[in-house]
Amino acid sequence: MSERVNIRRVQEKCFAFILRASLALCGGVLVFLLGSIVVKGFGSLSLDFFFTPAKDFGKSGGVIYQILGSLLMVVAAAVLVLPLALGTAIFQISYNARPKIRYVLEQSLYALNAIPSITYGLFGLIFFVNVLNTGISWFVGAVILAIMILPTAILSTYQAMAAIPKTYQENAAALGLTKAQVIRRVTLPQSFHGLVTGLLIGLARAIGETAPIMFIATAFSGVTVPQSLVEPVSTLPTHILELAQQSTDPQALQNAWGASLILVGLVAGFSGLALLIRSRLSSEGRK
Amino acid sequence: MSVITLNPPSSRKYRFSGTQAYCFASAALSILIVGTILLTLLVQSGPILLTGNADIIGTKWNPSDGKFGILPMLFGSVFVMSIAVSIAFPVGLMAAVYIAETRSSKLRRVLKSTLEILAGIPSIVYGLIGVTYLNIWIADLFDLQSGRIILTAGILLGIMILPTFLTLTEDAISAVPVKYRENAKSLGLYRHEVFLSIILPKAKSGIAGAGLLALGRALGETMAVMLVIGSLDRLPSPLLNPLSSGQTITSKLGREVTESAFGSPHFSALVFMGLLLVLITIFLTIASRYLFRQKDQHV
Amino acid sequence: MSSPKLSLVSGHSSADSSAEPHCIHMDGFSAYYGDNCIVSDVNLRLPPKGVTCLIGPSGAGKSTILRWLNRINEESERASFSGKIEVLGRDVLKGYPDVTELRRKVGMVFQQPCVFPCSIYDNMLMGLRSRKLSKGEARSIIEQSLKAASLWDEVSHRLAQPASALSLGQQQRLCLARALVLEPEVLLLDEPTASIDPVSSRAIEAFVIEQGREIPIIMVTHNIGQAKRISDHVIFLCDGQIVEQGTRAHMFSMRSAEKTRTYITEEFCDC
């Protein structure tokens, strides 16, 4: 009997060892990834890098227009997606009584979330650039990014709205407010943090995307601030892509790492803001 | 009696329908967008499906000959995905068990938030890491001229889906109530027995859901794969040789969409592959949602 | 309010238990959760047979004492204890380097019935891994245990069905039977009847009385009537300290401390 118990004990020790080894492996990968981004990135960062335009096909100079282009596009996407996400979320929570429509809408959103990013680009290329004949345009890119972050924004808003205790709405309705007034006075203020965090998480994802915009919205060199809706811009992710493809050139690679660090910084900034607002506003909303 | 009616009901009614109309329009537009995307891809892949002699289920991709066999790309996608999954799933599962079963909530918090940062790194940055390090290391390791091969893409992709899979799996394992652990342990079971006999069966649908979601991510990932896979439109020979260059559906799209003329059979074949990809990933997502819902019901 | 060191002289189980070794021995036991002291300076000696009921208001530390006896509490992050616990003559920490050995000797059943996601039979089999048994032996042990928990008649025809299909009361009895297959030398019961139906409660009480003739059973209960029905000894805890302990006859008589009497009568009124 004791022999059998010992075997089980050895098995337990092996199990524990495998767990630790796996965690160590994950930790190692994690440290390597973050470490290489930070170390390599800081190596090529300087104030000039932030504030000068790219020269020599990105090999020298900075990334000012890439940063501006990226920000322009995601901010436009946020402005586009805001009313749509809000309306759809309110529809789901307040007006949608039929379970079938609710189901279809929900599944559509999950489907939308699942679509690989490159096919968004493909869709944009067909539908906007060719069928609607817009040409390569940053605004089309913003529209596509808006579609991409739509599910995140809607779901986050919806969850915040669903978390409001039913008694709030019932009490407001008992005071004689109409449905629209209840929405405006109770539902909206109580769930605003959900919309904002959803948007920010969406932005964090959108700003790092390359595949959806590389066919339809960007040009590599010679681009400054766009003067109209139908001009291309240059963005950080597509800039990194171009530089990474010249990976034999150390100068290009170094600039790619610098741009990557800035991009990761922007992503982290948006996500951090989202977390902050979630903890701030949601605790305020509960009071 | 009628004096009590202060607001004329008509004005309320009007505002009511204003908000309502806005919400209905938003919801309709949201559904419309999904429909339009699917329809556009379907319509545009029509020409190649209607052309009889394009050999779409073939192994040769040669636009100048009018040969558009998608098998090499399909195979490449599945192959790269399999490598990624066979790296990420075991490591992710075991690390998730460690995080979930650890008694230190501090360690757990730190690890979870770092994983979230990792999941937020844009794929192009992973691509850059692949180009700078991984592909050179692999080339040195196997003594190859170029490290841009299926194996590199698979490993890189495995690293990319690891955070997502790990976090979701950890959620599923942590969601198993403590009482199961306590009951199992008071029967004198060892830790690995508690996990394998009790926790794993309880968490399995959640873990499977996490797996499917990660599969979907792996299939749809473009940038990182495109930079390191080598872009060769042939089936590897021998078929299961991970050291040969290859092509996935996504890397194919990323490379060739801008080179093909809109409306040509070439373009249409590319769109068809995109449509296929969309359908597969949507299926995986819906299946994983189903599994997650099952998990909620059980626990 | 000192904690009296007391060798319990039981009513009907054995006449001279003080001569026998103690199955459980606590000296200066204090338990903490983080910085909060849950139980302070408890001294206990329990005889090797009989049913001991821990009673007292919620938060008195009854469960905490129980949960340290098989060290299940060390799975919680911030729980710790000081002092000495001896179980079956061995120190609970040093005497059992392999904690699973301790847990196999000290069976435990919790308040919430908890069946594992497999068949009834596999649930029963879960504890038997430590013993080399043929299929027939295992089956007979399982049958005996299920009979002891008066569950056999209800489940004998459907042992292969998932255990989650049983009613809550049946699940709890399954948990008892499951703890029994290990032939534990001590049995800890943490309010086993608190969340189940009266019929199953009665069955469990009968089980406890029956098993208490063989092994020591320590049971937390909020139900004073139950303690009166089944206990040999009663320990009354309040605010993490032992107020009084003694035989059933003593504790439920007018000779017990005033605080005990107040608690017992007021709990009765609540029922």
Image: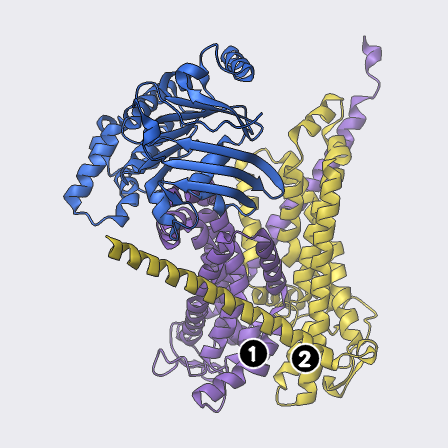
Name of the residue lying farthest toward the front: C19
Residue toward you, B146 or B234:
B146
Look at the numbered disc 1 and give the secondary structure of its residue. helix
Check whether the beta carbons of the residues at disc 1 and disc 2 lie within 8 A of each other.
Answer: no
- For disc 2, the chain is A
Q: Nearer the viewer, mark 1 or mark 2?
A: 2
From the top left corner, tell me how far across and down residue A189 is, in percent: 76, 39
Name of the residue lying farthest toward the top: B1
Residue shown at 42% from the left, 64% from the top? A17
- For disc 1, the chain is B
Residue shown at 43% from the left, 42% from the top? B182
Q: Is residue C96 left or right of residue B23?
A: left
Q: Which chain is blue?
A: C
Q: Is residue B229 above or below residue C100?
A: below
Answer whether residue B262 is visible to the viewer in this image. no
Q: Is residue A286 left or right of residue C236?
A: right
Q: Specify the amino acid type for callout 2.
A: Lys
Report which residue position mark 1 lands on.
Answer: B130
Chain A as rendered: colour? yellow
Q: Specify the amino acid type for callout 1.
A: Gly
Q: Is residue A154 left or right of residue B253?
A: right
From the top left corner, tell me how far across and down residue B163 is, in percent: 54, 62
For label 2, count other residues whose C-alpha is less than 10 Å away and answer few (under 14), some (14-19) or many (20+).
Answer: some
Report which residue position mark 2 lands on.
Answer: A40
Residue toward you, A28 or B254:
A28
Q: Is residue B67 above or below residue C65?
A: below
Alpha carbon distance from label 1 to label 2: 14 Å
